[in-house]
Image (tube, coloured by chain):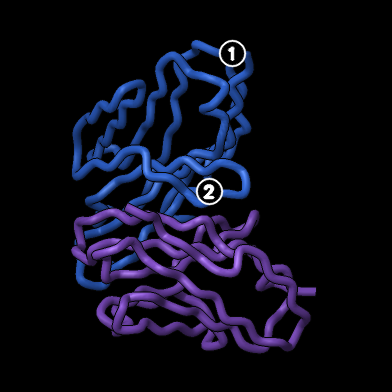
Chain colours: A blue, B purple
Amino acid sequence: QKEVEQDPGPLSVPEGAIVSLNCTYSNSAFQYFMWYRQYSRKGPELLMYTYSSGNKEDGRFTAQVDKSSKYISLFIRDSQPSDSATYLCAMKDAGGTSYGKLTFGQGTILTVHP
Amino acid sequence: KAGVTQTPRYLIKTRGQQVTLSCSPISGHRSVSWYQQTPGQGLQFLFEYFSETQRNKGNFPGRFSGRQFSNSRSEMNVSTLELGDSALYLCASSRGQLQETQYFGPGTRLLVL
């Protein structure tokens, strides 16, 4: 079993829809949670970064972390065709052996059609 | 501020050859991490360097190695290339603190024939 599970989709939604992307994890030591967006043939771009449990909002994006359920989510409101990309969740623990190491989900392919 | 840069962007090699990839971090960042991205395995951590020292290493064979220079630029080397080494190799930089996230470069796409 992978440490981080993410439904690869693909997910196809109409423009303006609310998109919900999710990851579950098994390692209770994970403390830092990130969402990256990756366009085709590009490197991952950081979207959201949260520490421990709670919500964080940035424009159309909201990240939620529920450590008790080992579950994180990313919501995209008023989705746009330009949001079409692969969305990757990533996690990191706070131990000294985790320097530089992010553990990623498989990524969810999202298409927003006009 | 310029982002993370990687060179070359594309490479074609044959089995048995070796390859060196280069990464220049964001100015002021002293930590460089390397990842391999494949359709089957996703993004997997290779190793991390900070101030010319390897602080962490993933579960890859010894054919994969790296180093970091005093200006924080980093190189990774893959020797005796195998077909399965075909992948997008990404580097990411940060200032180096545990709680910080990382910023990725565009990657080097390696094809092994």
Q: Where is residue A30 in the image (x, y as percent from the top left)?
A: 27, 53
* Number of numbered discs on residues: 2
| Left or right: residue B14 compared with residue A109 | right
Q: Which of marks 2 and 1 is nearer the N terminus?
A: 1
Which quadrant does the C terminus of chain A fall into? top right
Query: Is B72 in front, or is A11?
Result: B72
Query: Is B31 in front, or is A88?
Result: B31
Find the distance from the CA under tag 2 to the CA under tag 1: 23 Å
Question: What is the three-letter code of the residue carrying label 2?
Answer: Gln
Q: Where is residue B50 in the image (x, y as percent from the top left)?
A: 27, 76
Residue in the picture at 23% in, 56% down: B100
Q: How crowded is mark 1: few (under 14 residues within 10 Å), some or many (20 or more)?
A: some
Asked which quadrant contains residue B63, the reply is bottom right
Q: How crowded is mark 2: few (under 14 residues within 10 Å), some or many (20 or more)?
A: many
Q: Which chain does the residue under circle 1 lie in?
A: A
Q: Where is residue B5 in the image (x, y as percent from the top left)?
A: 46, 62
Asked which quadrant contains residue A40, the reply is top right
Query: Is B13 in front, or is A110?
Result: B13
User: For the view shown, which residue lies furthest in the right direction?
Assistant: B113
Residue in the picture at 61% in, 26% down: A111
Q: Is residue A27 above or below residue B89?
A: above
Residue in the picture at 76% in, 83% down: B15
Q: Which chain does the residue under circle 2 lie in?
A: A
Q: Residue under label 1, please give it.
A: A14
Dot 2: what SS?
Answer: loop
Question: What is the three-letter code of the residue carrying label 1?
Answer: Pro
Q: Residue under label 2, please give it.
A: A106
Q: Where is residue B55 in the image (x, y as percent from the top left)?
A: 29, 79
Residue in the picture at 44% in, 24% down: A20
Q: Which of marks 2 and 1 is in front?
A: 1
In contact (CB < 8 Å): disc 2 and disc 1: no
